[in-house]
Amino acid sequence: MAFIKASKPRAYFKRFQVKYKRRREGKTDYRARIRLINQDKNKYNTPKYRFVVRFTNKDIVAQIISATITGDLVLASAYAHELPRYGLEVGLTNYAASYCTGLLLARRVLKKLEMDAEYEGNVEATGEDYSVEPGESRRPFRALLDVGLVKTTTGNRVFGALKGALDGGLDVPHSEKRFAGFSKDSKQLDAEIHRKYIYGGHVAAYMGTLIEDEPEKYQTHFSEYIKKGIEAEGIEELYKKVHAAIRADPLEKKTAKPEPKAHKRFNLKKLTYEERKNKLIQRLNAFNSAAQGDEDSDDE
């Protein structure tokens, strides 16, 4: 039997449909996105807000976004790199920092919409589940959690940001099953364990373990904590002060950018016609004066 090469005909390539760019790059789950942004026609283009949380190696990004046909619009945003302004200079990507970032975004968006006085949220984080109650004048600000491509396991940092937004006064549909401290066996949330994570208790416990067992590893692993003078016993008080500072002033501050330096040229500036004309006249005058000086010296 002769060998027959299996080749795709031209008709196959004519019908091949390229996927969206962000799907090809592995950045967007369009199946989840379309369910988050779909809006009923009878709501007359009312914005449907998403509480978007994303993590990088050194930062946490939290945003309130609504989708339009021309692109997504960001109503407000908060970042973990803003937390040093509120007193948290180290550990900007852990569960406790996620809570602070979610709290900052919630207070910021409510302040922007002038709803911060009516919806204060849960002022003291106890670790228990909290849902905001409707006020007298305006309904609470509602947004849907957008976790992106992360695996929604119990205790994931994205749910720390969710808890911060809930305590900050936002209305986000949720279940307590994914918060840190939820027991699969008892089907209940252990508020004490959750509170420990909110106030960085898991970090403090790890610091204490390393100090006793591996002092050298503690010196390298928590070098920034040591430089700032942060000890395991003072972490909870530190986060309490950060939460209070965020509630006191959640608005973002624009940083003063230095003026751009004068551009350094590596080639000659192009002259205009008038400049070239004047330059030529100066060269001719200089040449004539030099020639006149030579004639005078010869006569002498």
Image (cartoon, rainbow, N blue to C red):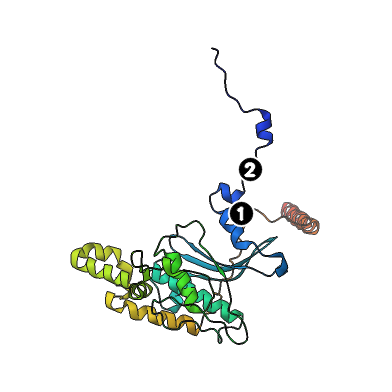
Q: What secondary structure is found at the residue carrying circle 1?
A: loop
**For the residue carrying disc 1, how many other residues have a C-alpha within 10 Å: few (<14), some (14-19), or many (20+)?**
few
Q: Earlier in the sequence, mark 2 or mark 1?
A: 2
Return the mark for residue 266. Answer: 1
- Residue lying at the far top of the rendered structure: 1
Give the camera-side residue of 239 and 290.
239
**Label disc, if present, on residue 71 of the rendered structure:** none
Q: State the residue position of label 2.
A: 18
Label 2 crowd (10 A; few <14 / some 14-19 / many >=20): few
Q: Which kind of residue does numbered mark 2 sit on?
A: Val
* Residue at the image position 36 percent from the left and 75 percent from the top: 191
Count the marks: 2
Quarter of the rendering containing residue 4 = top right
- Residue that lies at the very extreme toward the front in this rendered image: 186
Locate residue 159: give its quadrant: bottom left
Residue 166 horizontal/vertical position (percent) = 49, 75
Of 6 and 104, the residue lying toward us:
6
